[in-house]
Image (cartoon, rainbow, N blue to C red):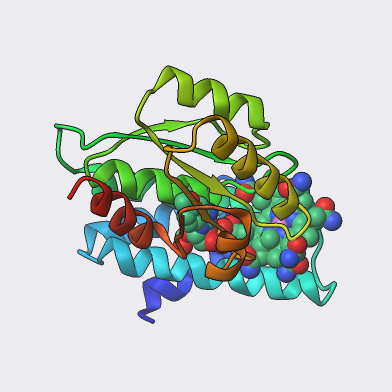
């Protein structure tokens, strides 16, 4: 990783959003993720590399959380710093076609508040020519059903980051398939797998945004 990427990674891991942020106290008055992301883009660093640095940071903070070395507030600060970097990356991922290939209804399932991965999927799918209807987080089955009715012919993407909310995801997939058998449902998120997707009755599993685009594009030939 280049020095700038290291700095972005460290700022996200430590939850240092930008220069004016008082947190963490030992990084007071230092540049934060926002300033370093701006600098990296100006220096011609590729958005993919910046994103990779962000993901490394989230993995590191996640591992620390697993070892009880940090707690939810630190995760929240890291997420805030990463969201700030993503604002800089948005124009690159969204600079796609204008004519849309179809509609993709996307949301994080009921009980689950994780949205960083979902937001990335949203950006990349949109940048690849799809209209994205982002329902947000903690999305109950009925909200997905309503969106499917409002956007006939849409494909649906469900995100879950918790093993506990995978059950809610399975229930949502089941209900969608009962009422709208032809609607293509793709699931994703860290605890998912091809096997889990198949058992839920989903049409596909996407490990990342690029895989989501590949599946969606295959639907329109
Ligand atoms: Co939480 N959290 N969290 N958390 N959190 C995890 C997921 C965890 C693995 C941490 C750990 O223990 N190591 C663990 C889950 C354990 C498990 O169930 N297996 C966990 C836990 C336990 C919890 C709480 C229960 C903690 C608590 O309160 N005690 C709590 C639950 C709240 C809730 O949802 N009800 C909680 C809360 C939070 C915060 C709110 C503080 C914050 C989220 C902020 C936000 O999202 N706005 C948070 C964070 C930041 C994390 C970690 C550190 C980072 C997640 C992340 O953003 N990753 C995470 C640990 C980790 O992942 N290493 C953790 C970066 C992101 C780019 O990756 O989301 O995987 P990801 O998305 C990827 C792919 O999965 C895929 O594409 C993305 C890009 O490649 N993808 C899709 C995702 N969705 C897709 C949908 C698709 C396709 C692909 O549709 C087709």
* Residue 118 visible at all: yes
Image location of residue 143, percent across then percent down: 60, 25
Within the displayed image, which quadrant is ligand 1 positioned in?
bottom right
Image location of residue 109, percent across then percent down: 65, 42
Q: Quadrant of residue 44?
A: bottom left
**Extreme residue in the right direction:** 68
The residue sitting at 71% across, 39% down in the picture is 110
Left or right of 171, for residue 135: left
The residue sitting at 27% across, 34% down in the picture is 102
**Extreme residue in the top direction:** 150
Q: Nearer the viewer, residue 1 or 125?
A: 125
In which quadrant of the rendered image does the N terminus lie? bottom left
Total marks in image: 0
Left or right of 93, for residue 110: right
Left or right of 169, for residue 177: left
* Residue 73 visible at all: no
The residue sitting at 85% across, 72% down in the picture is 68
Image location of residue 181, percent across then percent down: 48, 37
The residue sitting at 47% across, 65% down in the picture is 207
Q: Quadrant of residue 95?
A: top left
Left or right of 46, for residue 81: right
Image location of residue 152, percent across then percent down: 37, 24
On screen, 137 above or below 48?
above
């Amino acid at each position: 990783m280049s020095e700038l990427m290291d700095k972005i990674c460290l700022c996200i891991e430590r939850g240092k959003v930008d220069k004016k942020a008082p947190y963490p106290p030992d990084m007071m008055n230092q540049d934060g993720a926002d300033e370093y992301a701006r600098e990296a883009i100006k220096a011609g660093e590729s958005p993919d590399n910046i994103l990779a640095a962000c993901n490394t940071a989230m993995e590191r903070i996640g591992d620390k959380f697993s070892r009880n070395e940090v707690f939810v507030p630190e995760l929240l600060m890291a997420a805030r710093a990463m969201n700030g970097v993503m604002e800089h990356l948005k124009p690159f991922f969204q600079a796609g076609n204008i004519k849309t290939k179809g509609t993709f209804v996307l949301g994080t399932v009921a009980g689950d508040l994780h949205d960083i991965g979902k937001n990335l999927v949203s950006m990349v799918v949109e940048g690849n020519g799809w209209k994205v209807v982002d329902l947000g987080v903690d999305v109950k089955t009925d909200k997905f059903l309503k969106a499917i009715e409002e956007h006939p012919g849409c494909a649906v993407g469900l995100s879950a980051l918790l093993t506990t909310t995978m059950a809610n995801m399975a229930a949502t997939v089941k209900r969608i398939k009962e009422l709208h058998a032809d609607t293509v449902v793709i699931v994703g998120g860290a605890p998912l797998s091809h096997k889990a997707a198949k058992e839920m009755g989903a049409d596909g599993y996407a490990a990342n945004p690029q895989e989501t685009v590949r599946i969606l594009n295959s639907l329109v030939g």
